[in-house]
Amino acid sequence: MNAGRMMVGGLGVLCAASIASGDFITPDGYGWARGDAATTYFEWDWFTSTSGGNVPDVGQFPNPVPGGWLEPDVFETTGDGLITGSGNIYSPFGPIYVEVTIPNYDTGTGTTTLLLQVKTIGNELVYSDVVMDNQAPIEIVEVSRQTGDSGEEVEMLFVFEMAGNASVYVAGIPTAEAHVSIEGIAVDTFNQASCVADFNNDGFVNTQDFIAYLGAWSAGDSSADINGDGLVNTQDFIAFLGLWVAGC
Ligand SMILES: [Ca+2]
Ligand SMILES: [Ca+2]
Ligand SMILES: [Ca+2]
């Protein structure tokens, strides 16, 4: 009897905790942890203005951002949005458009993966039109959905892969109609160094990369210029062979 009660009590706590944090996923499933080198993290749960000056109140990395970086921020660009008493960005009359500015390292190299998460209550976003620097996501995931007092509570994840790495990214988040309440936004980014030996970019270094390189090299393709001197010659072949043997 006693043990049963304790179990029920334990379960109750577990449920409460999962609802309270029923929130955004961490980037671990995508190959990095918050705070890792070459990553950023900005999360808002409480918005104070539709015209910017929104400080990531849940957390951020790096904190503070390095000198010369733009501050991360959230804006409503149509002028038709307002801030509710509970710190949400709300569309009372019709569709609104929310932009998130995300500062970054500006390394210019490798690949940058960006995870944008948005939590809404009530009506929903135009999921197919959410963009990062006008580029469509490679993946859209419904993280959670539950029906609350004010309608559907939905958390969506949008995954973007961008070549290189910029000083700032701008996410565009359109709502479909009136009565969308944006409850929270989180963005995680990771700039992964490029792996030259993975020549066909499939995540593995194997014979296919060697064959692909050989093809590009015989054709004199600029992608075969490994040492970046503008010429495709034996030195590039030797350089690629070294990288290929070393792997990534
Ligand atoms: Ca909130
Ligand atoms: Ca490969
Ligand atoms: Ca060369």
Image (tube, helix red, strand yellow):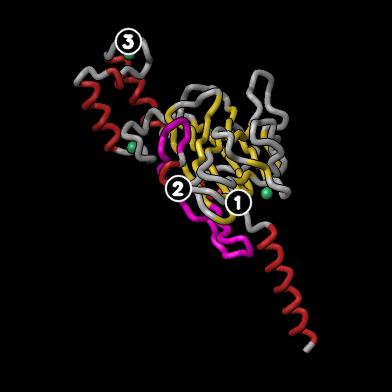
The residue to which callout 2 is attached is 127
**Picture disc at residue 230:** 3
State if disc 2 and disc 3 touch (CB < 8 Å).
no
**Quarter where residue 129 is shown:** top left
**Of the image marks 2 and 1, the number of the one nearer the N terminus:** 1
213 magenta-colored: no
Q: CA distance from mark 3 to mark 1?
A: 46 Å
Residue drawn where x is 52% and y is 22% of the image: 107
Point out the image quarter for the C terminus. Answer: top left
The answer to whether residue 66 is seen in the rendering is yes
The crowd level at tag 3 (other Cα within 10 Å; few <14, some 14-19, many 20+) is: few
Residue drawn where x is 65% and y is 38% of the image: 35
State if disc 1 and disc 3 touch (CB < 8 Å).
no
Mark 3, ligand 3, within 8 Å: the answer is yes
Magenta highlight range: 131-155
The spot of residue 127 in percent (x, y) is 45, 47
Q: CA distance from mark 3 to mark 2?
A: 43 Å
Q: Nearer the viewer, residue 154 or 15?
A: 154
Point out the image quarter for the N terminus. Answer: bottom right
Q: Is residue 245 left or right of residue 41?
A: left
Residue drawn where x is 33% and y is 31% of the image: 199
Quadrant containing ligand 2:
top left
Given the current orientation, which residue lies at the most extreme right position?
A: 2
The spot of residue 70 in percent (x, y) is 63, 24
The spot of residue 17 in percent (x, y) is 71, 63
The crowd level at tag 1 (other Cα within 10 Å; few <14, some 14-19, many 20+) is: many
Q: Secondary structure at mark 2?
A: helix
Q: Label 2 sits on what residue type?
A: Tyr
The residue to which callout 1 is attached is 24
Q: Label 1 sits on what residue type?
A: Phe
**Above or below, 8 relative to 191:** below
Mark 3 vs mark 1: in front = 1
